[in-house]
Amino acid sequence: MMQVDFRIPVNPVIQPPPLVEEVLDADERDALKARIKALMRAQDAVLVAHYYTSADLQDLAEETGGCVSDSLEMARFGHAHPARTLIVAGVRFMGETAKILNPEKRVLMPDLAAECSLDLACPADAFAAWCDAHPDRLSVVYANTSAAVKARADWVVTSGIAARIVKYLHRQGHKLLWAPDRHLGEYVARVTGADMILWPGACVVHEAFKARALAALRAEHPQAAVLVHPESPQDVIAQADVVGSTTQLIEAARTLPNREFIVATDRGIFHKMLAAAPGKTFIEAPTAGEGATCVSCAHCPWMAMNGLRKLLHVLESGANEIHIDEPVRVRAQRSIERMLEFAAAEKAGRIQLGD
Ligand code: 13P
Ligand code: SF4
C-alpha cells in the first residue's frame, strides 16, 4: 500500500537559480588546476565530486587521488580517506553528509548555496511534525535532505540502496514514512510492496523528463537501451531497461551490449559514461514534451554552481566550511551509519534479501 500525503504544504515556489556553467579556456583551466593541486597538497585535502559536476572537477578529482561517484560512494569514500580536509563538489547535503561522518575533518564546498529541490521541499520542523503524527511508522529519508531531517529520521538511504533497505524493513514487518522524493518513493514502494506514506517532494531535474516524448525517441532508436534514474516520474521509469543510481546507470552503459543509450538523468553523467563505454552513443532523454517546458533541461543548476574558480577561492580563503551543531550531527550520524552498516553486512553476506 502506498499513498502520497498531499496535505503536506511542500513549498510550491522552489525556484531553481538560472543555470550558469563555468566556461574556461585551456590556459586558465591549466593555471587553475596547477594552483589548486599545490594548495590541496599543502592542506592535505582530497576532492570528492558527484557525477553531475563539471568535467573539469571530475577530472581534477581523479587526477588528485579523489573520487567521482554517486552520493552513497561519496559518503563512503570521504569516511575512509585519511585526508584532513575533504572538498565536496556537489550539493549541500553531500557536504553535510561528509561532515556528519567526519566531524574531525575540515569539509569545504565550492559554493554553499548549491542546494537541492528535494532538501528545500522538506523543512525539518514540518518533517518532525509528520513523524510525530505517525508514531507507528519508521521514517526513511533520502540522502537529499538536511542534517536536521536526517537527525529526526530512523534511516537514511541513497538511490543506490533504497529499495534493498526498504525491502529489508518491510520483511521485518515495519510500515514506513518516506521523504522527500515522491517519485523515488513510488518506485521503491512498487518494487518492494512496502506500506509507505510519501512526502510530496520532487527533483526539478528528473521530474522534467517526459514519457510521451521518450516513447517517440525510443521509436526512432529501437536498438537503444533506456537508462533512468528513479527520481523520474513513473511513466518514464516504466520505459526503462535499467533503473538505478548514477553509478548503476554508468555500469549498465559499460556492460550492456547495446551501442546506443537514451539516458534520463542529469547530462553531467555523460562525461563518465563516455569514458566507461568508449565508442557507444548517449542520447539525452527529452525534457520538453508537447506543450511542456523544462525548468532545468537535464542539468541541475545547483550542481553547476561548482567550478574550478570557486574551488581555488575556498582553498585560498578557507571560506565555505561546513559546520553542524553537535547534537544534530550525532543523531544524523546514527541514521547514516545504519545505511553504511547495512551495505557492509549485505556485501559480507550477513544480510541476504534474494532478488
Ligand atoms: P545518486 O545517489 O544516484 O548519485 O543521486 C543523487 C542525486 O542528487 C540525483 O539527482
Ligand atoms: Fe537535487 Fe535533483 Fe539536483 Fe540531484 S539533480 S541535486 S535531486 S535538484
Image: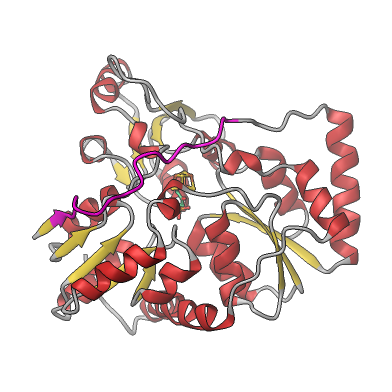
Quadrant holding the C terminus: bottom left
Q: Is residue 354 visible?
A: no
Q: Quadrant of residue 85?
A: bottom right
Count of numbered labels shown in the rendering? 0
Colour scheme in use: secondary structure
> Quick check: 325 above or below 75?
below
Q: Is residue 237 left or right of residue 124?
A: left
Q: Measured from the top left, where is residue 5 in percent x and y?
A: 18, 55
The part of the chain drawn in magenta is: 3-19
Q: Is residue 176 left or right of residue 154?
A: left
As drawn, the residue found furthest toward the left would be 1
Q: Measured from the top left, where is residue 115 in percent x and y?
A: 54, 49
Residue 151 sits inside the magenta stretch: no
**What residue is drawn where x is 45% and y is 75%?**
336
Question: 215 and 233: which one is in front?
Answer: 233
**What residue is drawn where x is 36% and y is 50%?**
244
Question: 91 and 166: which one is in front?
Answer: 91
> Quick check: 274 above or below 355?
above
Q: Measured from the top left, where is residue 72 in percent x and y?
A: 48, 63
Question: 243 and 280: which one is in front?
Answer: 243
**What residue is drawn where x is 69% and y is 56%?**
109
Q: Is residue 270 visible?
A: yes
Residue 13 sits inside the magenta stretch: yes
Q: Is residue 143 left or right of residue 40?
A: left
Quadrant holding the N terminus: bottom left
Q: Measured from the top left, where is residue 193 in percent x and y?
A: 12, 62
Q: Magenta residues: mostly which secondary structure?
A: loop
Q: Quadrant of residue 131?
A: bottom left
